[in-house]
Image (cartoon, rainbow, N blue to C red):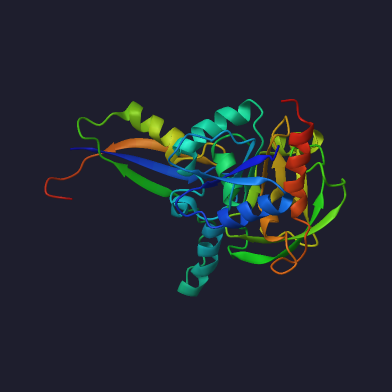
Amino acid sequence: MPRVVVDVMLKPEILDPQGQAVANALPRLGVTDVSSVRIGRRIEIEFSGQPDLDRAREIADKLLANPVIEDFSIRLADVPDGNP
Amino acid sequence: MTARIGVVTFPGSLDDRDAARAVRIAGAEAVPLWHDDPDLRGVDAVVLPGGFSYGDYLRCGAIARFAPVMETIVTGARDGLPVLGICNGFQILCEAHLLPGALTRNRHLHFRNRDQWLRMESADTAWTNAFQPGQELLVPVKNGEGCYVADERTLDELVATGRVVASYLRGNPNGSQRDIAAISNESGNVVGMMPHPEHAVEALTGPSLDGLGFFTSILKHLAGAPA
């Protein structure tokens, strides 16, 4: 059964101190050519029947993302048989 | 008649008992309210206390917003019920869209726990009428996600309409835009604040008694408000 994947990201104008902290740590790994890191959240939803994108959008808009500070995108992802 | 102030307990609330104590010290009756019960038990005002409701999962306050008790509080607040959200309570009020903006991770990523100076910017709310504008208070702050953010237009509007209720003074503990520590809704019955006035009501446990004014304000408001 396909899953609905919701990606939630802070809006571009909202400061992401966690992303900055990660970016600032990269030179310690010897990585010096990264200019920005931003951290978001990926949420996977499984419906008991067919995936309902409209319902997933409603869930994302009301609960998974805070539209004041975050944007979200929704897509279907196939789950190979046998995977949990 | 003694005013009845409800204090909500969510799973993960920490400061509900201190808030209830502050209500009693101010001279009102503290009425415990439960997250899973939409009945507000006829209270005259509601305090949403600090803590980590629902473990701060997803975003602080995001799940508490959908608690049965919140449905009644949101409806009541739109009809003028006074509501004070402290710390996690402020986060819940923003998530419930009773207040604009959002509380995000502190800019420096550190949890800040200290006594904090505030400047009162507005005495025109149900929860701050016992203060003078410009008055300085010392109350504890303790938060990891207390950085207030909103778009520039909202911030300008909050400032222009006197809805910034208190500002951080002598150091901003979390990077909040415009040093905002507390805001109110348009009609002044709903106030959200990151600092903890309920921890500054007794000399034994607080850095001052400055927090008591929020709780005496609501009594003054209720005494003067039409029935």
Q: Nearer the viewer, residue A4 or B43?
A: B43
Residue B153 visible: yes
How many labels sit on residues? Answer: 0
Residue B100 visible: no
- Which residue sits at x=12%, y=45%? A81
For the N terminus of chain B, the quadrant is top right
Q: Position of residue A22 (x, y in %)?
A: 50, 63
Q: Position of residue A27 (x, y in %)?
A: 51, 71
For the C terminus of chain B, the quadrant is top right
In the depicted structure, whether residue B74 falls above or below residue B216? above
- Which residue sits at x=71%, y=42%? B183
Q: Position of residue A76 (x, y in %)?
A: 28, 36
Q: Position of residue B94 (x, y in %)?
A: 59, 40
Q: Nearer the viewer, residue B67 or B16?
A: B16
Q: Is residue B38 left or right of residue B79?
A: left
| Name of the residue lying farthest toward the front | B1
